[in-house]
Amino acid sequence: MLTSVDTDLIRVLADPIRMKIVNLLARETLCTTHLVEEIGAKQTNLSNHLRVLREAGVVETEPCGRFTYYRLRPDVIATLAGQFTELAETARTTAAADIKRACP
């Protein structure tokens, strides 16, 4: 069975600012103001990164008055981790069986 890794999600998480956001949200639910303070990015730039994370399903929002709180969706991260685990297991099995394609 060929293991497939979600390359679109990898691209989303490959950005250093988005990865900082993910790391912060893994520890606590934060509003945009908190994230601006922690990361030091401009609000418009941060909002764009949060939109990308939201559209990719990595974070979810919770309105609270005039603020919006962001929460990490751990199931999405766990699914990606599982895909990498399966890929590593496939590589271990291939290496153990010494599977290699013959050259023409």
Image (spheres, rainbow, N blue to C red):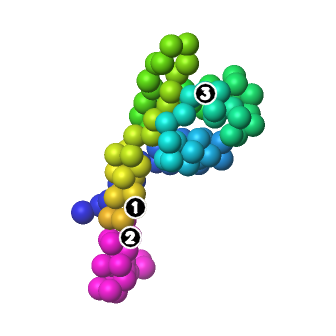
Which residue lies at the image location 30% right of the left edge and 61% below the top edge?
Answer: 2
State how far apart marks 1 and 2 are (Cα).
6 Å
Name the residue tied to disc 2.
Answer: 88
Left or right of 35? Residue 1 is: left
Left or right of 90? Residue 7 is: right
Specify whether residue 29 is in view: yes
Q: Amino acid at mark 3?
A: Thr
Main secondary structure found in the magenta portion: helix
Q: Residue furthest top?
A: 66
Q: Residues within 10 Å of mark 1 (few under 14, many from 20)?
A: some
Task: Tell which tag, 3 or 1, sits nearer the viewer.
Answer: 3
- Secondary structure beneath label 3: helix
Q: Residue furthest left?
A: 1
Q: In this orientation, which residue lies closer to the viewer: 70 or 82?
A: 70
Compared to residue 96, the image places residue 44 above or below, namely: above
Name the residue tied to disc 1.
Answer: 84
Left or right of 14? Residue 88 is: left
Q: Earlier in the sequence, mark 3 or mark 1?
A: 3
Name the residue tied to disc 3.
Answer: 32
Which residue lies at the image location 49% right of the left edge and 47% below the top edge?
Answer: 26
Specify whether residue 22 is in view: no
Residue 91 shown in magenta: yes
State how far apart marks 2 and 3 are (Cα).
36 Å
Q: Name the image quarter holding the N terminus.
A: bottom left
* Residues rendered magenta in the picture: 87-104
- Secondary structure beneath label 1: helix
Which residue lies at the image location 36% right of the left edge and 65% below the top edge?
Answer: 85
